[in-house]
Image (cartoon, rainbow, N blue to C red):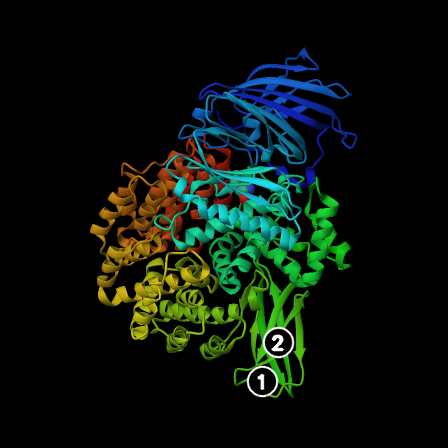
Amino acid sequence: MRDAAPTTIYLKDYTPFGYIVDSVHLTFDLAPHATRVKSRISFRPNPEATDTTFFLHGENLRLIRASIDGAEVTPEVTGGGLFAAAPAAPFVWEAEVEIDPANNTALEGLYMSNGMYCTQCEAEGFRKITYYPDRPDVMSTFTVRINGDLPVLLSNGNPTGSGEGWAEWTDPWPKPAYLFALVAGDLLAHSDSYITRSGREVALNLWVRPGDEGKCAFGMEALKKSMKWDEDVYGREYDLDVFNIVAVDDFNMGAMENKGLNIFNSAAVLASPETSTDANFERIEAIIAHEYFHNWTGNRITCRDWFQLCLKEGLTVFRDAQFTSDVRSAPVERIRDVIDLRARQFPEDNGPLSHPVRPESFQEINNFYTATVYEKGAEVIGMLKRLVGDDGYAKALDLYFDRHDGQACTIEDWLKVFEDATGRDLGQFQRWYSQAGTPRIKVEEAWADGTYTLTLSQSTPPTPGQPQKHPQVIPVAVGLLGPNGDEVRPTEILELTEARQSFTFQGLAAKPVPSILRGFSAPVILDQDSTPAQRAFLLAHDTDPFNRWEAGRSLASDTLLKMVTQDAAPDADYLDGLLAVLRDDGLDPAYRALMLDLPSQSELAAMLHDRGVTPDPMAIWTAVETLRQATAQHMQDVLPRLHSQSQVDGPYSPDAEQSGKRALGSAALALISRQDGGAQAASEYARADNMTLQLSALSCLLKAGKGETELAAYYDQWRDDRLVMDKWFGLQVALASPDRTPQIARQLTQHADFNWKNPNRFRALMGSLAMNHAGFHHESGASYALLADWLIRLDPVNPQTTARMCSAFQTWKRYDAGRQAMIRAQLERIASAPDLSRDTTEMISRILG
Ligand code: PHE
Ligand code: ZN
């Protein structure tokens, strides 16, 4: 059925629901095409509400019968739900509906994946299961009975009964419907247990399809580590007798924190050394932690409405990043997060899709699960912690859990606990939640009579709907280095609150070199006119690991930009500085590998655009290739030794130490392959005994225009492993040379294994196409057309995944008139597709602007 006409929903219009739900009883009679759902819900009038309309959400439901207090009623059914006449006293609503999970390809509500029943209810999927006030501020306990002829029947909470063909689950913790989950299938458990710090035993199960049992151990360890960490660091204990995780192959996102029954995209939980890379392991560990941490930040304390999404997501991302820093390397984690923020959030914040961390309006909430809400939302919490200090943060969090347990909250509630716990006024800080766009900070320096003055100016460019910006409070971490490289002033947080503000440092013997925005203390763009020599100095001496990396990074972008705009040669300061870093065995291999990384081509395009230059994707690609070649040449002597790091002693482990060595070894192999045409990579491929090394060797070969035999061998080896085949599809497109990208991508869409209805497979191919900057922006426009064709095809099947992929076009206004015209034509073609979903309609219209 077509979605109802798009309407815009506003934060300012919030009103509470007219009724309180005291309990929910659900009975499912499972059948692929005709599942019956019976509900029995106790309502009572909400004394705090003025609007007493009894409206229940419901979509794609066939209503069989409904009653109030046992008396049959005939509600007025609309496209989005139903209205009924409700008594002004407590009453029991009962209904029975029929749904068709086997035909649910949108993967929202109750659907099927490989014969298994599975649900996804966030944000508004529960209304596709039964009639209900499907809004997060309506919280209730749930009892669920599942009748079905399948060996494993799961729902939220604790098991309270089971027999042949049925099971009952009771969740004692009141929750909003978006946290409801049901799973039924032929699954196997990888089981373990955990004793909480107060001594309760919790049964842990990771449920997978037969054949995947060997890929569970790592996820289970990650879960136990997360449970322990949340007790140790936040004082948060788990609160049910069982914690279930289920892996499902067809899933729109990474994973979902349903109470006591997390549902994971297989790609976000299944892992083995043979089939997963080190990066996969690290991501899985972080996602397991993230979903587990939601039990307190999201579930016990939830969101009043979907505008408050960052309340749970920003905080939970912040917590999972803290966890990763603790169990792995803090500087490496920070650098990776910033790389990711710049790759995904900055383009969003500086383009047509820009929106505040807490949006003020939306048409389709699914379109707001964004890098801004998640990643910038986490950065905002990092700043808050920097401003109030570690103790202030700890006090505020304790107060948050004390005061708001069991409630559905707002950002105002969140900021209030910080104000109450620390006495600090956060009025100006609130702008981080309401003002969109990335602030830019300009740096000026002055030096006289032993006094060094740093003048910082902030400004934020206009964003859609917000032409005028006001100064924000920005914590700028600064340290000063003396001319010999010694630190003469340790890190201090400067609080920039005005549009322009000066900070002085007295009693210095010589003009210092400033190290600004240490640890990336705020999500801003720093605009500093340093010379390559100053950057090289920081690369050699900065005591802050983040800024040391940043110095190398900015040397790299400076030289690349000059290569593009002035036809300059690769900069010697960059190459020499990098060589010194690579030679320094005192530095963590993972850190050195990050030093070898270059800014992405898309990031370079944004930098050119910022400087008033229209980016030419081929010129950027050529500059990167030239710099890589020069790097390979310059580093020649150290490369074999760096590469040998990837051969570690002992059995494979995805831990920080081993994976860091492999990262460095792989980066070295990539450079070696530029010198030897892939000869060494071919032999590495032949002897690789884990996926990290196998994939790194294959990448080198593909980059070198080789690897045909290996691709075929890989296919034969892994054709039955869905996740490993996703990599096969993705890599070929990601590493295709620009001229061949559209053709290679098109051919792969014709491959028998291009199962495009599976979101992971679709994203592997189309996501890689969008990420191959020069290939995506092929001058023929063929890649744009290919992506648009597939978005049009996917939209009726899966609007959510389609809409997310539209963001591939969000940067279109950076490019030349010819490319803009071609992209516009594709966007308009998508917009005019018949019956386009609300999700995609909203995205395209925002991108077109
Ligand atoms: N709430 C999930 C998370 O971040 C993400 C998600 C959103 C999953 C919507 C599915 C649908 O952990
Ligand atoms: Zn989350």
Q: Is residue 592 above or below residue 353?
A: below
Query: Around disc 2, counting alpha carbons within 10 Å, would you say few (fewer than 14), some (14 to 19), or many (20 or more)?
Result: few
Query: Around disc 1, counting alpha carbons within 10 Å, would you say few (fewer than 14), some (14 to 19), or many (20 or more)?
Result: some
Q: Which mark is residue 133?
A: none
- Judged from the image, the secondary structure of the residue bearing numbered disc 1 is loop
Q: Is residue 315 above or below residue 336?
A: above
Note whether residue 806 is visible: no
Look at 54% across and 75% down and name the residue there.
543
Q: If you read the primary sequence from the N terminus, does the residue marked by circle 1 or circle 2 appear first?
A: 2
Look at 57% across and 60% down and name the residue there.
523
Look at 66% across and 74% down and name the residue there.
502
- The amino acid type, in three-letter code, at marker 1 is Lys
**Circle 1 or circle 2, nearest the eye:** 2
Note whether residue 687 is visible: yes
Q: Is residue 546 above or below residue 817?
A: below
Whole-percent x, y for residue 455 in the image: 63, 74
- The amino acid type, in three-letter code, at marker 2 is Pro
The outermost residue toward the top is 72
Q: Are marks 1 and 2 in contact (CB under 8 Å)?
A: no
Q: Find disc 1 in the rendering and name its residue.
A: 511
12 left or right of 155?
right
Whole-percent x, y for residue 333 in the image: 50, 60
Q: Find disc 2 in the rendering and name its residue.
A: 490
Whole-percent x, y for residue 6 in the image: 55, 33
Q: Nearer the viewer, residue 716 or 231?
A: 231
